[in-house]
Structure formats: C-alpha cells, structure tokens
Image: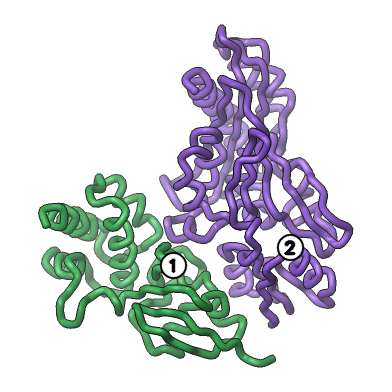
Chain colours: A purple, B green
Amino acid sequence: MRYEAPGTVEGAVALLAGATGEARVLAGGTDLLVQMRADIVDPGLIVDIKKIPETRAITEEKGGWRIGAAVTGAELKEHPKLKKAWPGVVEAANLIGSTQVQGRATMGGNLCNGSPAADSVPALIAAGALATLAGPKGRRDLPVEDVMLGPRRLALEKGEIVVSFLLPPRPPRSSDAYLRFIPRTEMDIAVVGAGVNLTVDGSGIVTAARVSLGAVAPRVLLVPEAAQAIIGSRLDKPAQERLEAAARAACRPIDDKRGTTEFRIDVAAVLTRRAALIALDRARTS
Amino acid sequence: MAKHHIQAQVNGDEVEFLCETEETLLDVLRDTLNMTGSKEGCSSGDCGACSVMLDGRLVCSCLVLGCEVGGRRIETIEGMAQGEKLHPLQQRFLEHAALQCGICTPGVLVASKALLERNSNPTETEVRYWLAGNLCRCTGYDKIVTAVMDTAAAMRKG
C-alpha cells in the first residue's frame, strides 16, 4: 500500500488520476481507517491531502467563508467568527463522534464518505455551500447537494477531490441551525438530521430559507417545498404546520432497528420545526 | 514496497522508526517503540483506550497512520508522570479508585489532562461530554468523573 502526502492540489490530482488500482483520499481518516481495518476498502494508494495548505485553512472570501476540506471539527469549534456567522454548520460538524474524533474528522471526509446520515452535510446544503473540486480537467464548483448521488456514490470524477467549501455571504438577520436525533445523548449516527438556514426582514418575516434533511433518503435532501412553506411567514403556527407537512412529504426513509420508516418521518417533521425556530431566534438576534 | 522512515517527537524525545503504510500510530507506539501504555480496544475510534495527543490535539492513535506523524509531536500516557512523581490526575484516580481493570485508564487520563489544560473549571456535564469517547466497562464512570472534578478543584487551588 503506497502512501503519498503531496503539498499541492495538482500533485494530489495527478496521483489519483494516475492510479491504476483503488485509490483513496485521506483527510482525517476517521472513516477511511475504520473501513480499511474492516476490509471494506483495500486501496493500493492513499493520498493524504493534509499537507496542502488550502485544504487546511479557514478564510473570509468575498463576504463569505471558505473552509478547507481537511479542517477538523475541533478547529471549526475554535473559530469564533465562523461560529457566529454559521452556527448551524459548526454545530453539525461538532456532532460527529467524540472529542478524539473531532480532533481529526473533517467536513470534506464527512461528505466524501457518502453516507446519507452524515451530520455536516444537511447543514452545508441548507447553508447553500459550494464544494470546490479539483480534477484532471481543472476546477469546478458544485452545490453540496449535487456531490452525493447515493450511499457511497459521489459525482466526483476519477482524480477529482474536494478542496474546500464556500459558504456564501450572509444578509443581515440570517442564521442557521442543525438538529439530529440519536437514541443516545452522544456518539451515534443520525437517525434523522435537519438543517435550516433562513433570513428574516426587520419585521420578522422570513424572506429566504433553505431546508435540508439527512438520513431519510438514499442521499441528503434539499427540500425546497419546506423552504417555500415558511418564506413570507413569521414562522407562526400555521407556517410551522406547513413546514412539518413539507418535511414529511420529502422523506423516503429506510426501516431498520435504529428507526422505523414511520418514526423517522415523524422525527423529521419535529426536528425541522425545532431547527427552524432555533434559526429564527438566532437570526433575530444576529 | 520500502517501509516509511519517520522521525517524530514522542514525550519530548526525538524518535525514529520504520513502518508500513497500514500500520497505525498505535501499532507503532506499542509494537515498534514498545510503549504499551496506550491500549487497543476497538480499533475503530469508538473506545478511546488508545488516546494520545498529536500536536496538542486529542486523537485516537488507532485512527492515525504511523506514516502521517513525521515531524509531529506526540504525547502518550508514558509522558504523564514526571519520573516517580505522578500527575495530579493519576494521583487522584488512585485515591478515588477510579479504575478497576485499568484498560481504559491510560486513555481516560490522557483525555482528562487535555480537558483540564483547556478548561480548568469544567462542569460535570462538560467532563462527561468530553470523555464520551472513552469507554469504561467497569466503573460506571462516576468515580472517573469525581476524580477529574476533584483534580480540577485541587489544581485551581495550586
């Protein structure tokens, strides 16, 4: 098994594009090493992207934020300005695993692991984040909701990597929130996750919203109908009911011992409403 | 394929070792450097028995490749006591009998030290959440949490 840690994006792309067998990108390793140990993957080449400076940086860009794909959850948590601007994204990333896992786990890895239950992904989708990809044909930006096609299936081409995420500039009175349900209080995989990002005007009316649901379909969903249900409202009771109905209608969950189909749909509605109310509260006071 | 030749700092000492790509930092610590204080519990990042500090950050050494740590700073349980003098956490874990079989203890101590370095006055909830990635199948956690809280109080008094 070959290990390479190139210092440039171009170096990483060339290695991955030229690989003859299975090749894997290593960011935090909290999924990859577990899968290697369990013989789920057996790559001939591992390309560690952590020596590439732009995968490790958090920078303000054109009024928004660029977050390197290999920035860890612990580093996100320790960035007060980013946390203030995007509390939902940071709290979602911080829900992944333990303190130890937070020291290594990354949003790039969380997305590219290709799990519909990935905690940071609904928050990124609700945020309207773009994933900046680099590959043999150059760079391109993809909305995060278009990166994952299904469980373990990504829209990335051979040799392509996620370099960073771009969170857009925020109008005044905007905020976001992410909630998930797990049967324990900590250290578990989402049975349902809900991310809501919204903007309110000076009189408290929602002028823009994005809603995303995790673990209720083969991929993390962007739910425009749920956003439409609250735009123009003050998130009063009727708007909350419309929001819950739209969230329910979008769910196509599996049925397993961690949550039945019925249960996941119910919880998706509740979490969407609660996340929206938290985002609203944050937006009003931001 | 040739082994990787890695130089790193472990508990303040410069070390050199050879490792295969698939060897984890935990494998290197235990089998190559003969530092068996860090334990292998689950090998999947769930139990925290292999907790070490990597460049000042608490991580599971079973989820780090040995070849990733070139030029980096590692701290393990072996570096916690200063010679014969135990770290206050170690001393209070003994006094509170905060261990039974002892397998989780090195990881719990390393993780607790990392907490107290960041937060000298944690609440019980903060201690429990910080240590959620350190599984103990013997104590039921109460004695561990009490020992950490008591150490924090004593260290604040100096």
Exactly how many numbered labels are in the figure? 2
Local crowd at mark 2 within 10 Å, few (<14), some, or many (≥20)? many
Query: In the drawing, what numbered circle is on residue A205?
Result: none
| Image position, residue A250 (x, y; %) | 72, 31
- Provide the residue designation for mark 2: A9
Secondary structure at badge 1 equals: loop
Query: In the drawing, what numbered circle is on residue B55?
Result: 1
Snapshot quadrant of residue A245: top right
| Image position, residue A98 (x, y; %) | 44, 56
Secondary structure at badge 2 equals: helix
| Image position, residue A240 (x, y; %) | 58, 17
Local crowd at mark 1 within 10 Å, few (<14), some, or many (≥20)? some
Q: Is residue B47 visible?
A: no
The chain that hosts pointer 1 is B
Q: Nearer the viewer, residue A283 or B40?
A: A283
Amino acid marked by disc 2: Val
Residue A270 in the image: above or below residue A3? above
Residue A154 in the image: above or below residue B52? above
Residue B132 in the image: above or below residue A37? above
Q: Taking B57 as reference, is A157 left or right?
A: right
Quadrant placement of the N terminus of chain A: bottom right
Q: Taking B46 as reference, is B83 left or right?
A: left
Amino acid marked by disc 1: Asp
Q: Residue sitting at 26 percent across and 58 percent down? A: B141
| Image position, residue A93 (x, y; %) | 54, 47
Q: Residue sitting at 39 percent across and 70 percent down? A: B52
Snapshot quadrant of residue B89: bottom left
The chain that hosts pointer 2 is A
Q: Residue sitting at 74 percent across and 62 percent down? A: A9
